[in-house]
Image (cartoon, rainbow, N blue to C red):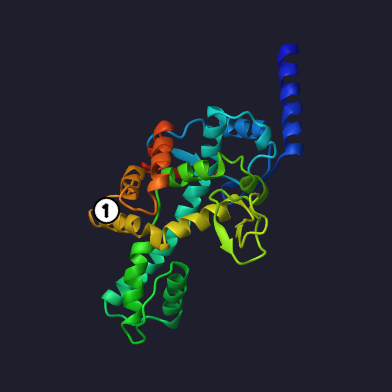
């Protein structure tokens, strides 16, 4: 009985310490974390059985970190750290994909309405125009053909992306979250801003005309990069491959994107690194229908 008492007491003391150092907020089935140490995060993932990410049809708890752990730069480099980095990003990538899926579903409803020769409301037309600006879809048309043309482009651009590619790119560009940009600006992909004083100046050239884009949290950073993949001309070939896969009632996987990158002169330099990274960590399995699971 005495041993059991001390175990309970020590467990209580541990949780008091965790609660005092971590900043967690449960909201709508998600655990939103503003501050946490690496050790506390590892324990948290274990409590919610988020031990692995390399199995198919994975259930991923809605644990959303706003920033990397407070002691991330001091945590030893290596496989354990990299795998933890992957587990930090996976729920956030899936969350952004959920938001993209919602946008696409709304656009599909409008498209179906047009196909049925029903008149669109001004609100629906405005929604299409706003998404066209967001996803860089353009047409010079001014007549009644404008909305159908925009919808056609949006159906190619507004779609989910394989988590494996996003996470592998984040690991490569940010040196697994240890770069100055990642630690100071939640910036994982070295996105640039030109001719502005905003963002972080590059260390190598303080007087450069560009800055590195910074973000309020990791989710905003991931959403920005995923929007870039869904809108920038450099990724057009990838979006077309995804469009073809969807027509065949299939989904696009990371391996297919890397293969497409090899044929694209703008992306060849990064494709090999991404391919090695998601192959080594079996990240391709995160593409096989992972699902976010509410925190109970």
Judged left or right of residue 289, residue 88 is right
Q: Position of residue 216 (x, y in %)?
A: 64, 56
Q: Is residue 136 left or right of residue 114?
A: right
Q: Position of residue 16 (x, y in %)?
A: 76, 33
Which residue is drawn at the image coordinates 76% and 32% (left, top)? 17
| Rendered image quadrant of residue 156 | bottom left
Q: Residues within 10 Å of mark 1 (few under 14, many from 20)?
A: some
Q: Residue sitting at 53 percent across and 50 percent down? A: 189
**102 lies left or right of 205:** left
Residue 67 in sight in this render? no
Q: Residue at 47% x, 74% y: name it.
A: 130
The answer to whether residue 135 is visible is: yes
| Residue that sits furthest to the bottom in the current view | 143
Nearer-the-camera pick, 186 or 126:
186
Identify the residue under disc 1.
245
Dot 1: element: helix
Vertical relation: 54 (above or below) 5:
below
Indicate the position of residue 168 as horizontal and vertical percent values.
46, 42
Q: Nearer the viewer, residue 121 or 228?
A: 228
| Residue nearest the observer in this picture, 76 or 264 | 264
Which residue corresponds to the image point at 30% horizontal and 76% vertical from the top-left?
A: 114
The percent coordinates of residue 86 (x first, y second) are 51, 38
């Amino acid at each position: 009985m005495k041993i059991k008492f001390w175990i309970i007491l020590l467990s209580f003391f541990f949780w008091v310490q965790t609660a005092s150092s971590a900043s967690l907020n449960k909201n709508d089935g998600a655990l939103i974390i503003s501050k946490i140490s690496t050790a506390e995060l590892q324990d948290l993932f274990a409590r919610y059985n988020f031990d692995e990410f390399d199995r198919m049809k994975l259930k991923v708890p809605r644990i959303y970190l706003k920033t990397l752990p407070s002691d991330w730069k001091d945590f030893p480099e290596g496989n354990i750290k990299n795998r933890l980095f992957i587990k930090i990003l996976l729920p956030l990538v899936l969350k952004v994909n959920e938001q993209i899926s919602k946008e696409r579903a709304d656009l599909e409803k409008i498209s179906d309405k047009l196909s049925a020769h029903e008149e669109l409301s001004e609100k629906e037309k405005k929604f299409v125009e706003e998404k066209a600006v967001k996803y860089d879809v353009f047409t010079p048309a001014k007549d009644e053909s404008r909305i159908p043309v925009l919808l056609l482009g949006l159906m190619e651009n507004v779609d989910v992306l394989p988590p494996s590619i996003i996470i592998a790119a984040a690991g490569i560009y940010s040196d697994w979250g240890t770069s100055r940009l990642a630690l100071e600006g939640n910036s994982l992909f070295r996105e640039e801003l030109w001719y502005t004083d905003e963002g972080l100046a590059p260390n190598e050239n303080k007087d450069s005309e560009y800055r590195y884009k910074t973000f309020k949290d990791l989710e905003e950073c991931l959403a920005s990069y995923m929007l870039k993949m869904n809108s920038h001309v450099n990724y057009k070939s990838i979006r077309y491959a995804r469009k073809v896969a969807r027509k065949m009632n299939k989904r696009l996987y990371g391996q297919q994107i890397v293969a497409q990158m090899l044929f694209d002169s703008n992306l060849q330099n990064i494709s090999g690194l991404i391919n090695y990274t998601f192959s080594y960590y079996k990240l391709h399995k995160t593409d096989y229908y992972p699902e976010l699971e509410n925190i109970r």
